Image (spheres, rainbow, N blue to C red):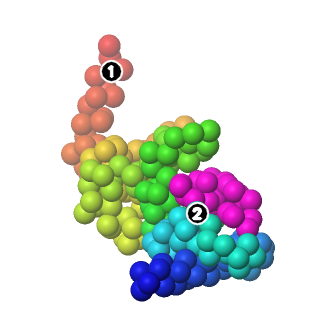
Amino acid sequence: MVKDWVHAMSAQVNGEIVSSLRHALGRGEFGLAYVPKLIKEAIDNQAWEEFYDEVERDVLHHSSFESFVTTEPPEGLGTDVRMIQNMCRDHRDVLDEIDKVTQGVTGVHNMNTRPWGTSAAQALRKLRKDAPEVHAKVIAGDISPNAGMIKAGFRKKTMQCPVEVEAVVRAIRSHFTEQEIEKIGTFLVDSATR
């Protein structure tokens, strides 16, 4: 009996989280400011898996976060994971939580939820898996995902500049030591004489 009561209370609390999230999504710019916090809360509490809905007067269940996000209200949020990620793009910790809960998901929408290329989500996943101490610094906002990938040795530092002699010289001076600049000069002279 106590277990049933605890379960019902948990579903009730989860329902309040999901209801707040639905309202935030529907309230335009004002509500969207609350979406990252509510998404994190829904994931942390696993509220998306099972929650009580006041409208349906029933406990609703989802087997995946993606199902919760894509199912129309009141059973779900009625959007897609990519949109949720976009709303949370300035919150690395939330993006990381979304990635954890969607990682390994198979199905039609998987291509939209799996991070690829050089995206921040892909970097967070790689760092979480292979460099947890650097991952923690990225989540804390101490360094960017790209700087974390460079620090962990998964990416090489790159530079960009306009294709103009002066701009290239400025870029070289700002990124290389005197010894490296000397080496670049020697390399350029050697390659020009070939």
Residue 147 placement (x, y as % from top left): 37, 56
The disc placed on residue 45 is none
Q: What amino acid type should be assigned to the residue bearing mark 1?
A: Ser
Q: Residue visible at 57% across and 39% down?
A: 107
Residue 150 versus residue 18: which sits nearer the camera?
18
**In this rendering, would 150 be left or right of 3?**
left
For disc 1, the marked residue is: 191
For disc 2, the marked residue is: 61
Q: Could you classify mark 1 by the number of other residues whose Cα lies within 10 Å: few (under 14), some (14-19), or many (20 or more)?
A: few
Callout in the foreground (1, 2): 2
**In this rendering, would 54 be left or right of 172?**
right
Quadrant (top left, top right, bottom left, bottom right) of the N terminus: bottom left
From where the camera sits, is residue 166 visible?
Answer: no
Marks 1/2: CA–CA distance: 66 Å
Q: Are marks 1 and 2 in contact (CB under 8 Å)?
A: no
Residue 115 versus residue 54: which sits nearer the camera?
54
**In this rendering, would 133 be left or right of 58?**
left
Q: Secondary structure at mark 2?
A: strand
Q: Residue visible at 62% across and 76% down?
A: 52
Q: Residue visible at 34% across and 44% down?
A: 155
**Relative to 118, does residue 42 appear above or below in the rendering?**
below
Residue 187 quadrant = top left
Q: Which residues are magenta?
A: 62-84
Residue 144 placement (x, y as % from top left): 42, 61
Residue 105 placement (x, y as % from top left): 49, 45
**Relative to 124, does residue 189 appear above or below in the rendering?**
above
From where the camera sits, is residue 93 visible?
Answer: yes
Q: Find out whether residue 64 is within the magenta segment.
A: yes
Quadrant (top left, top right, bottom left, bottom right) of the C terminus: top left
